[in-house]
Image: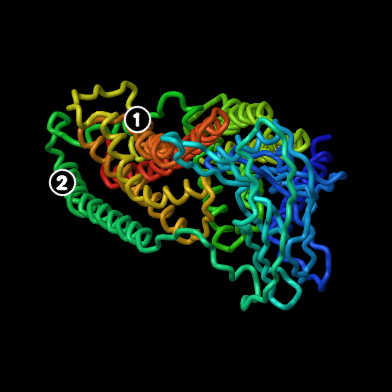
Amino acid sequence: MARQARMPGRMGRVAAVCSLMFGILALASAQSAKYSKGDHVPLFANKVGPFANPSEQYEYYTLPFCAPKTEIRKNQHLGEVLAGDRMMETLFKLPFLDSFAHKRVCSYHLRPKDIQRFQDAIDQDYYFEFIYDDLPVWGFIGEKETTLVDGKNEVSYFLFTHYIFSVTHNGQGQVIEVNWEHDPRSRLDLSDATKGTEVTLLYSARWTKSHLTSRDHVEVKAPQHLEIRWFSIFNSIVTVLLLTGFLATILVRVLKNEILQYARVDEEGGMGEAEETGWKLVHGDVFRVPNNKELFCAILGNGVQLLSIAVGVLFLACLGLYSHYNRGALFVAALLIFALTSGINGYVTGAFYTKMQGQNWVWAVVGSYLLFLGPFFVICTFLNFVAVGYNSSTALPFGTVIIILLILTLVSFPLNVVGGITGRNFAGPFEAPCRTTKMPREIPPLPWHRQGTFQVVMAGFLPFSAIYIELYYVFASVWGHQLYSLYGILTIEFAILLIVTSFITVALTYFQLAIEDHHWWWRSLFSGGSTGFFIFAYCIYYFNFKAKMTGFMQTSFFFGYMTMACYACWLMLGTVGFLSSFSFVRYIYKSIKCD
């Protein structure tokens, strides 16, 4: 993130930044420390917020709990800050292997406005998150009950005042798992907000030895529904096999027969242009450079980069880098891979733009850098201001924003420019199998079901149908509180998505050329990327019927980030669709004799 003399310094800065980020990843994946009996293990308060709004997070002591007189903050790495963690040491003391019961945290007076704040928080199902030895601990601050009195519903509010921490260890000085529960007999009635009240907070600790030797062996307590998910994969594989068989039929039978027929006619020399039909008739237009080639090449560059990011993130996930205690590792990995793959973006853009004989290659490379990053930066800036307006801990600190900007300017942008120069200089000329005519051929009238809009919709439906079940679990993890751990299944689904997108786009491109429609460049890109529109439609369905998110902040975060995710899918899958069609078109036109 003279000229030869400055290059080593720049490369040194790039290496230093990359080494720093790899160190952050290593720190994020660090294992539990080892302790002796009685050692101090701090319990950090991380956040509170409405359970239905995972992006709406606040610091724990924004609620009127008794706070330490001196703030002791945890030194957090970049990933934790990006995840919205703001950890502060609490008054709870949980020494290693020290079990006790009913220890007092504090006693203090709640004013009427404090009681009202607790009532509002309980109404919104506020939960809290503590961090103990890098392990998250979740719980609710209170509950409400509705009773029928004289034919009317009366709501009673209760604050939990006795926290019970159950900690397991492996007998070797390491913490394995931490759980939280409350004593149902210790609740403070906060139904009356017209007068203050006294509150005393208590807590207990229970230490037990676990049969597990490492926290990596702890079973993730989340609904997996393996039978449904494996059935979804089986259904997707069947879809891939059917598409493969369908395309094999086209390539082996129909296409092969057509190629042999055209070759036989060419040898006999007895068929004029008037008698030619099908995809051979448009051989003089099929390799005509599309309009807006700067934008087209920029889309291809971004698509290949996003595909590289997806593969890299999934590869690290399969290695076990991400877990519920490797906080923010996914964000750091995505940022690192994005920065390092910017050169791929520039190279693909520069190479294709040169093959298309473009002259304004500087703007093409700069445009490729800003095509995805520009809208993403605008949306992130807007959402950060929204979080600041809500005084939410999700808002990124100014220092973190500066670090990200330095990574983008000192690593990402230079690599993009170097990649663009390399692609421009080393890209060979475009050798089309057929010569392009000067005047484009007129496209005959097409029925409605053979036009672009219908084909784009058809192209997106099949890939989406192959992934929509797994998509629910991804959404439940990203926009909920379920822990996602089956990255192997996610990788298989991603591979199926790419294969189905490639096959369906190739098939539709063949049908398009067979009816003498030679405008296939942009069509294949939109056909491949149309799955992104289906995913966005699913976002609307999920938000309205599956999730229970409310409020301007959560709505902005959901649709802001999902809009960029769907845009990324459109770029990536559109590129996959075009490159597959491009290879297919070159293959079939190489197989015939073109005048």
- The amino acid sitting under disc 1 is Thr
- Quadrant where the C terminus sits is top left
Residue drawn at the location 76% of the way across and 33% of the way down: 398
Q: Which mark is residue 436?
A: 1
Of 123 and 115, the residue lying toward us: 115
Secondary-structure class at tag 2? helix
Real-space CA distance between mark 1 and mark 2, rounded to the nearest whole angstrom: 22 Å
Residue 377, picture quadrant: top right
In the rendered view, would you say 516 is above or below 461?
Answer: above
Left or right: 414 as drawn, with respect to 261: right
Of 578 and 374, the residue lying toward us: 374
Q: Which mark is residue 261?
A: 2
Applied colour scheme: rainbow
Image spot of residue 349 (x, y percent): 54, 36
In the rendered view, would you say 515 is above or below 325?
Answer: above
Image spot of residue 327 (x, y percent): 66, 53
Residue drawn at the location 59% of the way across and 63% of the way down: 320
Residue at far right of view: 70
Residue at far front of view: 150
- The amino acid sitting under disc 2 is Gln
In the rendered view, would you say 123 is above or below 334?
Answer: above
Secondary-structure class at tag 1? loop
Residue 291, picture quadrant: top left
Q: How many marks?
A: 2
Image spot of residue 501 (x, y percent): 36, 46
In the rendered view, would you say 465 is above or below 115?
Answer: below
Residue drawn at the location 38% of the way across and 54% of the way down: 496
